[in-house]
Amino acid sequence: MPSLEYRLTIKDMPVDLRPRERLLRDGAQSLTDAELLAILLRTGTAAGTALDLAAVVLTHFHGLRGLVQASVEELGEIKGVGPAKAAQIKAALELGKRVATNTSQDRAVIKTPEDAAGLVMEEMRHLDREHFRALLLNAKNQVIGQEIISIGTLNSSAVHPRELFKNAIKRSAAAIILIHNHPSGDPSPSREDLEVTRRLIEVGHIIGIEILDHLIIGDNRFSSLKAKGFM
């Protein structure tokens, strides 16, 4: 006789321990990363529940940061996930990123370094390459645009003044806040960061567009070169 394969689901768990019921009762913030992911997965494998599978996925990608960076193909290679569940996971992560971005962008006036960092933190903290961006501001310090200036390798990005100021001039920006991430998660400024900042400030003085600050984004933390006295 062929062996019977039993597919465990979250419904096999006691009601008080089921992630979906706990979410409805206590709110999504009360759940762990694995429990939230288990709700998306819905079912597990013959070897375990959806919660077990969620734990396997998070361990495989070393947590949420790695999961955000994983491709649909990489997710689908995990036993028990497959293309459909992989697509669901990526769709949910993308929605989360967009919600975070849109919510932050409601805060259109930049008064502090925290305001600027809040616009980009949720997206840029997970990037695996160095991205150099610019927030374009009008005379009232309102954000009128966010420009991607360059995308580098694992530890550097090439920043050319002409690329930075070209669109700033087109948009009639009065000032710019420079932003780039450190994929290592450590936002401490490097010597290269300071040199690039100094060079761009000099060009800004000539053109008439002030560089207000340069933020370095790490993993849920950032450095402001102005606040640190480097500008």
Image (cartoon, grey):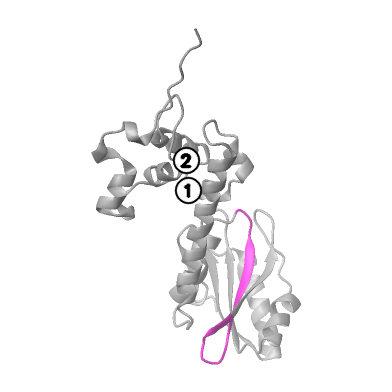
Measured from the top left, where is residue 210 in percent x and y? 61, 87
How many neighbours does mark 2 have within 10 angstroms: few (below 14), some (14-19), or many (20 or more)? some
Compared with residue 108, is residue 56 higher up or lower down, i.e. above or below? above
Query: Residue at 52% across / 73% down in the picture?
Result: 225
Disc 1 from disc 2: Cα separation: 7 Å
Can you tell which quarter of the image residue 103 is in? Answer: bottom left
The image shows residue 100 at horizontal and vertical percentages of: 47, 65
Position of 173 with respect to 79 (left or right) is right
Numbered tag placed on residue 58 in the rendering: 2
Q: Which residue is mark 1?
A: 64
Query: Could you classify mark 1 by the number of other residues whose Cα lies within 10 Å: few (under 14), some (14-19), or many (20 or more)?
Result: some
| Range of magenta residues | 128-144
The image quarter in which residue 139 lies: bottom right
Tell whether 145 sits left or right of 63.
right
Could you tell me the amino acid type at mark 1? Answer: Leu
Does the segment drawn in magenta span residue 135? yes
Quarter residue 84 falls in:
top right
Marks 1 and 2 close (CB-CB < 8 Å): yes
* Amino acid bearing label 2: Leu
Closer to us: 140 or 225: 140
